[in-house]
Amino acid sequence: MSTPSEDHQSLHAARLKYRRCLLEYFNGDQQICSDEAYDAVISELAGLQSRRPEWRVWESAATRVVAPAMEAAPTRRHESPMLSLANAYSLDELREWERGLLRLVPGENLAYVAELKVDGLAVAIHYEGGVLASAVTRGDGTAGEVVTPNAKTIRGLPHVLPQTIDLEVRGEVYYSLEAFGRLNAARERMGEPPFKTPRNAAAGTLRMMDASVVGARGLSVVIYAVAAGSPKPTHWETLAWLRSLNLPVGEHSERLESLAEVERFQARWESGRKTLPFQIDGVVVKVDNLELQERMGSTAKSPRWAVALKFAAQRVASRLLEVKPGVGRTGILTPVAILEAVELGGTTVSRATLHNYDQIERLGLMTGDRVFVEKGGEIIPKIVDVDRDARSGGERAIEPPQGCPSCGNPPVRLEGEVDLRCINPECPAQREDRIRHFVSRPAMDIETIGPALIGQLIDKGLVRSVADLYRLGTSQLESLERMGSKSAANVLGAIDASRAQPLHRLLHALGIRHVGERTARILARHFASLAALRRASPEEMEDIKEIGSVIAQSVHAFFQDPGQVAIIDSLRNLGIDPISVEAQSAKSQPAKSQFAKSQSMEAQPVEAQDGQPQPPQGNLQGKLQGKTVVITGTLSEPRSRWKARIEEAGGILTGSVSKKTDYLLAGAAAGSKLAAAQRLNIPIVEEAEMRRLLEGQFMEGQIMPGQILEGQ
Ligand code: IVH
């Protein structure tokens, strides 16, 4: 065991090594610090810092790998809107764009900067005094999600600039094809559906709640602009300046004197894109002179001085060898086209999706056909056309399967659906996929149960539903192949540990249609327990801003399904009935740990929806301890602010009024929840009263049902 002072010396040395590596990484032509050395320094730092949490400070590389998990990303308003780009799909459209510009600035000589259009996700990155202070996604262009801890894990994005300046830069976060391939391979191993495109993957990763996972995934970023007020007169010089600040600026950008040169740039990259280690979907052309940019201005959506010249989708011919149905946890039979292997956009393609059997009919597809395969924005190619002239007569019609490929039961087409579905609740493939989903990392995270073990558990009849996992015992596990007593104990330990997972993970794990990670979090936050969600009507769910009718109906239908209810009841009887993280923290109200204190430099202030940081609310601790509060109607302050206050006072927010509700905070135009509270004699408070309640001026019980209400 090392002493604190030895640890401190090691930390100091590791930090120095890290800084040297970073400088070499960004500045050196010859890289002295190898990737391995860099990784070794980071893990050394991470190791030291895991022993001494108070050392997890911003300047350290280890925040890239061990930044704390965020529970929900706060949003923040952009100081200047994050605009999008107008598209041009042909050189004619590009020339038309230039003619339009010359009408705005007649007689000017236009020079351009052409850049690659990386297919990722736009972010704004703020440096304060030269230190990376925050990162915000584009969101709707006006406000985005604060993703600072995750952005800090992006290798190549400096945490410290060589100048102590305040600067907001904008760029694109993306996955290299290699990192994307690695990520999807890992997902498939875990039984999770692969991401369709690097762009989807980047968006999903950046908005993930756990920065340590993000760090392991290997995102990249390219910076392409200063948000406002470049100190340089041209975009080209701005890029050079950003590069001098060690920011990762695109290497392939060029300053071009005319549109003819731009056209050559685009042609070169249209064919050269396959040599790139990342995916691009076009080139971006920008007027170089910033004063001219200013004169040209922007529309509400995009600047006039820039345009995205998109590439045509890539297409090749191949042969359809066979169509195989696949079946997942929802029972949908998806036809997969098995193709003669062909090169397309830098990868070898031997499979394509066909979405459903209607599409086969629409295309008039036959086995043995010469087909055209296209790769657009999606990484998974699709069959877009059939070469009927190339038919030899030996082609065979493709029939929809008569039986599920797993259980043989005849599939059905449910009313209003195009998909064929296996509705056999006993279908092994569905069962297997449901369990695979349940144990997957973003769900219950029972890592030790891999696909092979799931297969064995099902084949041996030990597990039929997810609830059976919690009934497994040592002797049953030890009876399986390749399962010693140590592995069995590990598996049981991991299953047991998953009992502590919060509500949103269980909700996601249950595999409710349309309920992914994000929706599960929203539902958990509002309803706090499975029982409350189960009781909620679709209307109550739709009261939540982010929940639309499709989700609400699907969740409601799930809880009406006797099979699902039986599983949920079994889970509850086995002790798996979690509450939301919000309710957990309101319940426990822990004193700030040393770790939390050391994170305060790093922590984002809680942001209200209007983008203003939350002012401290004074000591609200305990004023609503354990009380269940529902909010309804239009309030004079953002709901998020009320929620933060109530939670700070120990209150538990739920989304629906029930006998267990202690208070209904009602604003103007309150509807069904107000009526429910009146019916159930629940105390109804308006904002001013809630303020007083929080300040402790009211004693419990003094507020009478139906007291003064705004908007009545
Ligand atoms: S400039 C105000 N440059 O493409 C100008 N955008 O389809 C803002 N993108 O929202 C964008 N590479 O997310 C610019 N070199 C590049 C880009 C780029 C990719 C993205 C960006 C933008 C989207 C528009």
Image: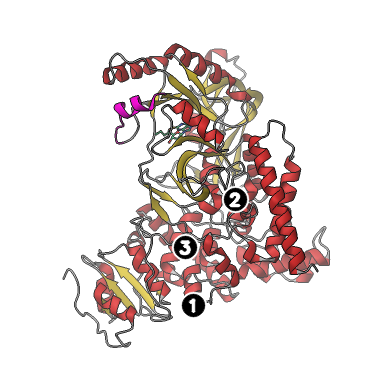
Q: Is residue 344 visible?
A: no
Q: From the viewer's side, name the closer residue of 83 and 163.
A: 163
Q: Which residues are magenta?
A: 288-300
- Is 524 situated above or below 121? below
Disc 1: which residue = 587
The span from disc 2 to disc 3 (Cα, nearest Å) is 36 Å
Q: From the viewer's side, name the closer residue of 95 and 542.
A: 95
Upstream in the sequence, badge 1 or badge 2? 2
Q: From the viewer's side, name the closer residue of 590 and 351.
A: 590
Q: From the viewer's side, name the closer residue of 342 and 517.
A: 517
- Is 560 situated above or below 657? above
Kind of residue at badge 3: Asp
Q: Position of residue 344 (x, y in %)?
A: 61, 24
Instruction: Quarter of the image for the C terminus: give it.
Output: bottom left
Disc 2: which residue = 214
Residue 480 falls inside the magenta stretch: no
Where disc 2 sits, the SS reads helix
Where disc 3 sits, the SS reads loop
Give the image quarter of residue 523: bottom left
Residue 533 as seen in the image, left or right of residue 511: left
Q: Position of residue 701 (x, y in %)?
A: 30, 88
Kind of residue at badge 2: Val
The span from disc 1 to disc 3 (Cα, nearest Å) is 32 Å
Kind of residue at badge 1: Lys
Instruction: Quarter of the image for the N terminus: give it.
Output: bottom right
- Counting other residues with Cα less than 10 Å from the Cα at mark 3, is it few (<14), some (14-19), or many (20 or more)? few
Q: Foreground mark, 1 or 3?
A: 1
Give the image quarter of residue 28: top right
